[in-house]
Amino acid sequence: MHESKKGKKKGKCGPYCAPGKHNPEATSHNADHFWQLHPEQRPNSGAKSAANGPPTTQLVEVDEGHESEVSLLLTEAASKPIVLDSGATHHLINNPDVFQPTSESNIKIATGGHSNFLNATAVGIETLVNHLGKQITLENSLLVPSLTR
């Protein structure tokens, strides 16, 4: 008999660490192997990206006294580019390296096509850093690994 896996959760589950602070109840690592405190221990995602160095980013923010404030993050890397969509109901990000999950999710996101959907796999906090070291933190963001544009 075929058993449907629809609706069953996959992937890692909590407890989760807060950004920059290790949670002793986390089961996937200990404090000595917490990559946010020890980034030098993070394994390279591949020889190709390691050979080309870290991605180059630029954060541009504009506030000229108007009702809206605009932010734009530009990233250049040899591997899959980071996509940030902050014009949706939630901030959407496709890169788990800048994302700290707070809970799992299985949220379908309509893309405007008739039956085209993206799937958010986690809710959490994303932290982006520009070339000057300035950080921008976006809470209640959705991780959408299949987001490409």
Image (cartoon, rainbow, N blue to C red):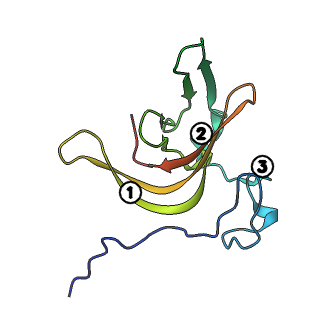
- Say few, some or many: other residues with alpha carbon within 10 Å of mark 2 (under 14 / 14 to 19 / 20 or more): some
Marks 1 and 2, Cα distance to the nearest angstrom?
30 Å
Identify whether 74 is placed above or below 140: above
Q: Mark 1 points at which residue?
A: 107
Side of 85 where 115 appears, left or right? left
Point out residue 61 in the picture as x, y percentages from the top left corner.
61, 20
Residue at 55% from the left image edge and 22% from the top image edge? 69
Disc 3 marks a residue whose amino acid type is Glu
Disc nearer the start of the sequence (1/2): 2
Whether tag 3 and tag 2 are in contact, CB under 8 A, the answer is no
For numbered disc 2, what is the local secondary structure?
A: helix
For numbered disc 3, what is the local secondary structure?
A: helix
Whether tag 3 and tag 1 are in contact, CB under 8 A, the answer is no
Disc nearer the start of the sequence (3/1): 3
Residue at 72% from the left image edge and 73% from the top image edge? 25
Q: Quadrant of residue 60?
A: top right
Q: Mark 2 points at which residue?
A: 49
State which quarter of the image contains the N terminus: bottom left
- Indicate which label's residue lies in the foreground, 3 or 1: 1
Marks 3 and 1, Cα distance to the nearest angstrom?
33 Å
Q: Mark 3 points at which residue?
A: 40
